[in-house]
Amino acid sequence: VKTIRVKTKPPYTVVIGEGALGKLPSVLRNVSPSKVVIVSSPRVRKHWGTELERVLRATRMPSYWIEVPDGEQHKTLRTVEAITRSMARAGADRRSVVIAFGGGVVGDMAGFAAATFMRGISLIQLPTTLLGQVDASVGGKTGVDLPEGKNLLGAFHQPKAVIVDLRFLSTLPSRQFRAGLFEVLKCGFIADRSLLGYCERHREEILRCEPDALLSIVSSALQVKAKIVAADERESGQRRILNFGHTIGHAIEAATRYRSLLHGEAVAWGIIAAAEIGANVGVTRPDHAERIVEAVMAFGPLPPVTAKPREVLSRMKADKKNVYGIPHFVLVPEVGSAKVVKGVDPRIVRAAVEGICQA
Ligand SMILES: NC(=O)c1ccc[n+]([C@@H]2O[C@H](COP(=O)([O-])OP(=O)(O)OC[C@H]3O[C@@H](n4cnc5c(N)ncnc54)[C@H](O)[C@@H]3O)[C@@H](O)[C@H]2O)c1
Ligand SMILES: [Zn+2]
């Protein structure tokens, strides 16, 4: 088991390993809650609910399950209202703790419920997908979607602790697992050359989910995220580099109506396009752009982007991360480093988007 300290204000610990769940009792003793509220989905509860209950029973703390339906389409204020009303009926109070037990969808909603219930109560993230483990559970972003756009409503609310039990990944569908790997690779591209080298050399072990390989890549990716988040809690500067591949990735998700590609897969295409853009504006070393594209492809195949380039480009203009309507691109000069670039020639962007669209 490895631990990483996230030095936000206040700081918290991420525990990573096979069986990290065993650390939950001591985390809970520190929080000393009046009641434990577990927010989860039916699928996660089916696979791992008994295991969590066994660990909780030993603490003798009163606990209560709230199940929310699976899927991004349920990441809404309506579901958060249902969660918080259920908490109120169960007698949750200011000293209760919410455990977010599921993928990023559950994590974002349970986190938002914890951020807002009685103006904010304690939260523990217990992520069960690779994306949740390396990305969504750390950094304090919580929230829901609106019909007008993804993640438009939310709050920053740092957890008391994050427990990353790698055993949970054993029941994850392989496509979900690979989608998470692209966020791991992203961390390598922007900030950790040795993580990238490890992924290139140990592709087989990673895809077979061998414990040593998982521990290595998940803890390295979390180290990158923890460091960047602590340096820029509210995303005013450096934290934006975590959006490498996301400007175009988000536009692809929107243009394909969130149906044919998983988030990580759309980001993978976005990374390929960003490497191409970087090389063409003279920011990314050409050999490094090639290495980025090859590393992404090695963890494919990716479903095709069945949207028109025009559609993707117009979605990009509507991105909430734009400043005065001008898209900013995160580009990688050399693997292991990143910077935010504005004023990229729209023709270069269009060519890169045309290069990845297959409609
Ligand atoms: N807050 C953040 O900083 C942040 C960062 C990245 C992504 N996100 C959000 O995360 C969400 C995506 O998260 P996701 O990719 O985890 O998707 P998800 O939460 O929808 O989970 C994917 C699927 O895997 C299932 N599942 C979860 N754990 C499982 C397990 N151990 N075994 C078997 N099946 C399991 C779920 O039931 C679901 O069907 C998006 O809403 C995105 O906006 C948030
Ligand atoms: Zn992402």
Image: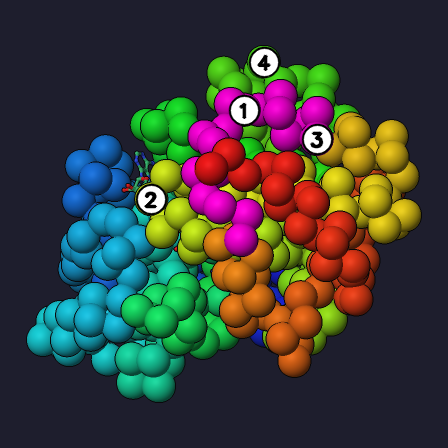
Near-viewer residue (242 or 19): 242
Corner quadrant of residue 347: bottom right
Determine the CA span between mark 1 and mark 2.
18 Å
Determine the CA span between mark 3 and mark 2.
24 Å
Type of amino acid under label 2: Arg
Instruction: From the top left corner, tell me how far across and down residue 171 is, in percent.
Output: 32, 27
Determine the CA span between mark 4 and mark 1.
13 Å
Which badge, 4 or 1, is on the more N-terminal residue?
4
Q: Is residue 294 magenta?
A: yes
Callouts 3 and 1 close, C-beta under 8 Å: no
Which badge, 4 or 3, is on the more N-terminal residue?
4
Residue 304, compared with residue 115, is above or below; it is: above
52 with respect to 15 (left or right): left
Is residue 56 shown to the viewer in this render? no
Mark seen at residue 210:
none
Q: Secondary structure at mark 4?
A: helix
- The residue tagged 3 is 293
Q: Secondary structure at mark 2?
A: loop
Determine the CA span between mark 4 and mark 3.
18 Å
Q: Which residues are magenta?
A: 293-310
Instruction: From the top left corner, tell me how far across and down residue 128 is, in percent.
Output: 38, 42
Type of amino acid under label 1: Gly
Type of amino acid under label 4: Glu
Q: Residues within 10 Å of mark 4 (few under 14, many from 20)?
A: few
- The residue tagged 4 is 204
Q: Secondary structure at mark 3?
A: helix
269 with respect to 102 (left or right): right
Which badge, 1 or 2, is on the more N-terminal residue?
2
- The residue tagged 1 is 300
Instruction: From the top left corner, tell me how far across and down residue 168 is, in percent.
Output: 37, 34
Type of amino acid under label 3: Val
Q: How is the image coloured?
A: rainbow
